[in-house]
Amino acid sequence: MRVRAKAGPGLAFAVIAFLGALAFIRLAPSDPAVWNVDLAAGDLPSNAHVFCIRPDTRYGPITGDPNALLARLDAIAMATPRTERLAGSAAEGRITWITRSLLMGYPDYTTAEVMDGPSLCIAGRQRFGSGDMGVNAARIGAWAQALLGLQEAPEMTGL
């Protein structure tokens, strides 16, 4: 005698809920007014990762045009897989990119801004959840390493 297992309505509901959550994560709109924020104002969540090239750090001072440095960073960011520009430009002095995780498509937002000093600060934060397992710090570190021609990724400096 052969017994067949039947998938109940609970399993169907779970599958539909999972697919709905995936669709929401991937299709939720990203409002530039929410994510392309003024870093100097300090309106970042406490779990944001920040790296700044400032005159008072070993990575500063910035020599040359800081907007040109931001344009170079934009090229590095746009070469990163699953990354697109959300808002801003080097000429404006601030750019925000969205980078999505490979499997689930979770969006992370990275903003770089030219500030007085002159300095260039890069801040990364995730949209969903309270922790990112170091993904934003690693991406910012890799971008800064490429931008500055360093042998290793720099530590986050904070604003």
Image: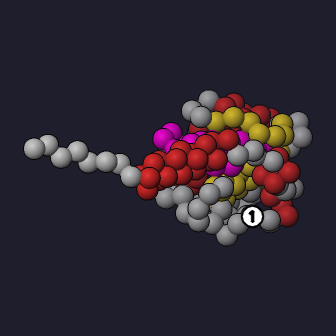
What residue is drawn where x is 89% and y is 40%?
92
The residue wearing badge 1 is 44
Of all residues, the one furthest to the bottom in this rendering is: 46
Of all residues, the one furthest to the left in this rendering is: 1
Q: Position of residue 72 (x, y in %)?
A: 72, 33
- What is the image's colouring? secondary structure
Q: Image height check: is 72 above or below 21? A: above
Q: Is 127 on the left or on the right of 111, as rendered?
A: left
Q: Is 135 on the left or on the right of 45, as rendered?
A: left
Q: Image height check: is 136 above or below 130? A: above
State whether residue 138 appears in this view. no
Q: Is 106 on the left or on the right of 123, as rendered?
A: left
- Classify the position of the C terminus by image quarter: bottom right
What residue is drawn where x is 59% and y is 34%?
82
Of all residues, the one furthest to the front in this rendering is: 1
- Name the magenta segment's main secondary structure: strand
Q: Nearer the viewer, residue 96 or 9?
A: 9
Q: Position of residue 85 (x, y in %)?
A: 74, 36
State whether residue 17 appears in this view. yes
**Mark 1: few/some/many CA within 10 Å (<14, 14-19, 20+):** some
Q: Image height check: is 71 above or below 128? A: above
Q: Position of residue 120 (x, y in %)?
A: 76, 50
What residue is drawn where x is 80% and y is 66%?
42
Q: Is residue 136 magenta?
A: no
Amino acid residing under circle 1? Leu
Location of residue 144 (image quadrant)? top right
Magenta-colored span = 95-110
Q: Nearer the viewer, residue 71 or 45?
A: 45
Q: Secondary structure at mark 1?
A: loop
